Image: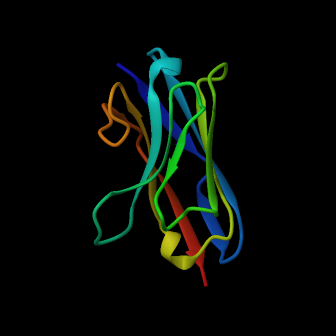
């Protein structure tokens, strides 16, 4: 069983930046494909960004491409999401997720961290 704990959320003004972190325990972190999802009030959870197990390949939703960067440090069992040029529509609960096989079909989820962008 993998335990994922997110941190770094908060309140920021539009145009600002935040960096989310997600630290994993209880499993072979370096084997997992890691991703970030988000869920805004009244909306379905959506894929935001993902990274391959070795960190060589990254994937982004069109809505965040060019503004967000996903990275990982396998030595620290941690994946990051650097979010720049934040917009009010980025407001959501952000979830870290780990997948054994398919990046967009995670096997494990974190508890989520709130990101609020004020206009």
| Residue nearest the viewer, comparing 46 with 16 | 46
Is 103 left or right of 25, judged from the image as shown?
Answer: left
Q: Residue at x 35, y 25 (%)?
A: 100
Q: Is residue 119 left or right of residue 40?
A: right
Point 59% across, 55% down: residue: 9
Q: Position of residue 38 (x, y in %)?
A: 42, 57
Q: Which quarter shows the C terminus?
A: bottom right
Furthest-bottom residue in this view: 119
Q: Position of residue 6 (x, y in %)?
A: 53, 42
The quarter in which the N terminus is drawn is: top left
Q: Left or right: where does residue 109 sit relative to residue 16? A: left
Q: Position of residue 19 (x, y in %)?
A: 67, 51
Find residue 27 and report its image quarter: top left
Where 103 falls versus 90 (above or below)?
above
Give the answer, above or below, for where 77 lies relative to 36.
above
Q: Residue at x 33, y 34 (%)?
A: 102
Name, please, the residue furthest toward the front.
57
Residue 2 pos. (x, y %): 40, 23
């Amino acid at each position: 069983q993998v335990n994922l704990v997110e941190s770094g959320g908060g309140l920021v003004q539009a145009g600002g930046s935040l960096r989310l972190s997600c630290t994993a325990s209880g499993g072979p972190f370096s084997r997992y494909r890691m991703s970030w999802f988000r869920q805004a009030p009244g909306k379905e959870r959506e894929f935001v960004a993902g990274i391959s197990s070795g960190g060589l390949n990254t994937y982004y939703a069109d809505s965040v491409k060019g503004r967000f960067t996903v990275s990982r440090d396998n030595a620290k069992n941690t994946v990051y999401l650097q979010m720049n040029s934040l917009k009010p529509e980025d407001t959501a609960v952000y979830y870290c997720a780990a997948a054994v096989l398919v990046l967009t079909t995670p096997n494990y989820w974190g508890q989520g961290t709130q990101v609020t962008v004020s206009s």
